[in-house]
Image (cartoon, rainbow, N blue to C red):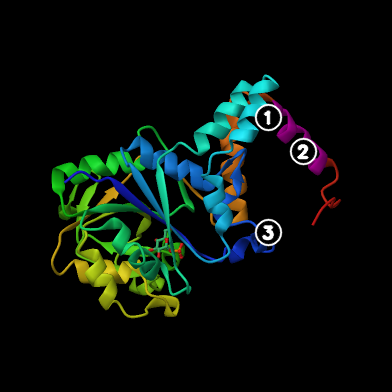
Amino acid sequence: MPIRKAVIPAAGLGTRFLPVTKAVPKELLPILDKPMLQYVVEEAVEAGIKEIILVVSPGKESIAEYFQPREDLERRLRESGALDLAAKVHQASNLARVSFVIQAQPLGLGHAVLMAREAVAEEPFVVILPDDIIVHSPGALAQMLEVYDRCGGGVIAVETVGWESVQNYGVVDIGDQGGRVGRVGQIKGVVEKPPRDQAPSNLAIVGRYILPHAVFDCLERTKPGALGEIQLTDGLHLLLQTHQLFSYEFLGRRFDGGRPLGLLRAALEFALDRDDTKEELMSLMATLSLERAELPDRRRHN
Ligand code: G1P
């Protein structure tokens, strides 16, 4: 069955970005001029996804606004000759069919995905966590869909991380190396945010999942786990009793858009890749490091 729908949980409080997230949802914070959310929606569309289901919490209405057409603004931009800007504004509201479901209480990622059950209906689907920005062509999701076409079951994106940070992630157990074919491993177990000494590996789950519909029944049965929340990883643990899940080490570079410095780093690297910003940024960075070398203790900002 072709995969047509993507669920994007965007209901978190964005505490790492307070106070800005008092008024602006984290998912709309920009990497240069485009919200984080748009990068992952574009990755989904590139992979052939037709419908995006955003799970939001009350107070995040501006996310819906972002996907609405703004004909008045487009007209003004066209009239003033800013055709490229008019095209960007148009594109943001024409990416895919976007619908919304509300997660009224912050009960965890697994619970947020469960809220999309009706909207997904009886189909396999993908889950994309918008904090994880992955740069590659073809995109991570397109790569994973190829694996899904070959292997079926479910496919979870993973990345090798330092052992000191396994406790921040869901971690997969794929047994010994014999269970791995190229970038694909057969998952034997999953655990959310394990302490280092209990982690089955340092293969961390990254925010891209292709899942069978049966995961919803598992999430219904999932009890609160790490951090007292209903975890998606714990739902996957139950799913493993009846379905095969494969890990996939994607090609590409991941940025952690869930932290201010991760987002800043993404912005810097994206700007270095763009013809219209590269030169200016390079010379700005050279100037900054010279100034700091001369006056290391002088702080201009906090
Ligand atoms: C979530 C998932 C975790 C996964 C991570 C990837 O954790 O629960 O399994 O490894 O995203 O970014 P969070 O970052 O919300 O703590």
Q: Between 62 and 35, which is closer to the camera in this rendering?
A: 62
- Mark 2 / mark 3, whichever is N-terminal: 3
Q: Residue at x 35, y 62 (%)?
A: 116
Dot 2: element: helix
Indicate which quadrant contains ligand 1: bottom left
Give percent across and percent down for residue 208.
35, 52
Inspect the image, locate mark 3, and give the three-letter code of the amino acid beneath it. Answer: Val
Extent of the magenta region: 280-293
Within-10-Å neighbours for mark 2: few <14, some 14–19, many 20+: few
In the rendered image, is residue 119 in sight? yes
Q: Which residue is mark 2?
A: 288
| Rendered residue at 21%/52% (across/down) | 185
Kind of element beneath mark 1: helix
Quadrant of res 21? bottom right
- What distance separates the C-alpha of mark 2 from that of mark 3? 26 Å
Q: Assign a secondary structure to mark 3.
A: helix
In percent of width and height, residue 248 lies at 27, 49
* Residue type, label 2: Leu
Q: CA distance from mark 1 to mark 2?
A: 10 Å
Q: Which residue is mark 1?
A: 282
- Nearer mark to the viewer, of 2 and 3: 3
Q: Identify the amino acid type marked 1.
A: Met
